Image (tube, rainbow, N blue to C red):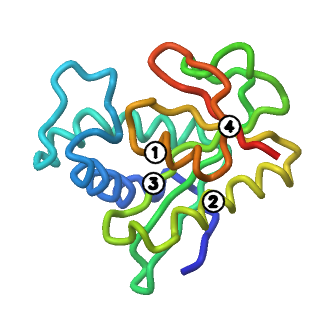
């Protein structure tokens, strides 16, 4: 499996929508959290998920992510994703605390592994890749997540340290 940069992220919108829905199903609707939605769709309701998530995904792919990478399996299906957001100037990133909004901040976003590939090291590969890429760019790697998600303890095991709590999130930074 190879990590590929996606030059035109919007061209993958439909494929990524299905990929993210599988992650949503596998977490029983916990991730993505859809925290802005009052009545979250059931994990078996693709049309409901698409209705609430597609506009958000389109926004992120088109305006928020500075770089998007996918990991594809041998059949070409998306097995994992990671996005980098490091040019925060002029972006509506209300979920990023002012204290870390500077030219050295690189956010690791949209980090997911398809449920079929969990526990095989693909997430570790993607995360290490993202951290190294941000280092190349002169950025410090941050993650903003929810404290109740399993991802929180995963990041701590991978060398991230809690920097602060912010709104309903927790901000983590890669040490070293």
Question: Which type of secondary structure does the marked residue at label 3 adopt?
Answer: strand
Tell me if label 4 and label 2 are in contact, CB under 8 Å.
Answer: no
- What residue does disc 4 label? 142
- What residue does disc 2 label? 7
Q: CA distance from mark 4 to mark 2?
A: 23 Å
Question: Which type of secondary structure does the marked residue at label 1 adopt?
Answer: helix
Image quadrant for the N terminus? bottom right
Nearer the viewer's eye, disc 4 or disc 1? 1
- What residue does disc 1 label? 151
- What residue does disc 3 label? 112
Residue in the image at 68% along x and 48% along y: 159
Q: Residues within 10 Å of mark 3 (few under 14, many from 20)?
A: many
Q: What label does residue 45 carry, if any? A: none
Mark with earlier residue (3, 4): 3
Q: CA distance from mark 3 to mark 4?
A: 16 Å
Nearer the viewer's eye, disc 1 or disc 3? 1
Q: Residues within 10 Å of mark 1 (few under 14, many from 20)?
A: some
Mark with earlier residue (3, 2): 2
Residue in the image at 47% along x and 63% along y: 80
Question: Which type of secondary structure does the marked residue at label 2 adopt?
Answer: loop
Tell me if label 3 and label 4 are in contact, CB under 8 Å.
Answer: no
Could you say which is closer to the camera, residue 6 or residue 112? 112
Tell me if label 4 and label 1 are in contact, CB under 8 Å.
Answer: no
Tell me where residue 167 appears, x and y as whole percent: 49, 13
Question: Which type of secondary structure does the marked residue at label 4 adopt?
Answer: strand
Q: CA distance from mark 4 to mark 1?
A: 13 Å
């Amino acid at each position: 499996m190879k990590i590929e940069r996606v030059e035109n992220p919007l061209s993958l919108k439909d494929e990524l929508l299905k990929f993210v829905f599988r992650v949503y199903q596998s977490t029983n609707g916990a991730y993505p959290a859809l925290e802005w939605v009052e009545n979250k769709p059931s994990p078996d309701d693709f049309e409901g998920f698409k209705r609430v998530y597609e506009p958000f995904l389109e926004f992120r792919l088109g305006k928020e992510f500075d770089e998007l990478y996918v990991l594809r399996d041998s059949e070409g299906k998306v097995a994992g994703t990671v996005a980098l957001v490091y040019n925060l100037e002029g972006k509506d990133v209300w979920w990023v605390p002012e204290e870390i909004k500077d030219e050295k901040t690189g956010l690791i976003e949209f980090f997911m592994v398809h449920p079929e590939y969990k526990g095989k090291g693909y997430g570790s590969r993607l995360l290490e890749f993202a951290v190294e890429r941000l280092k190349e760019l002169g950025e410090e790697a941050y993650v903003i997540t929810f404290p109740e998600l399993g991802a929180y303890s995963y990041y701590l095991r991978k060398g991230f340290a809690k920097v602060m709590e912010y709104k309903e999130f927790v901000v983590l930074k890669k040490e070293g």
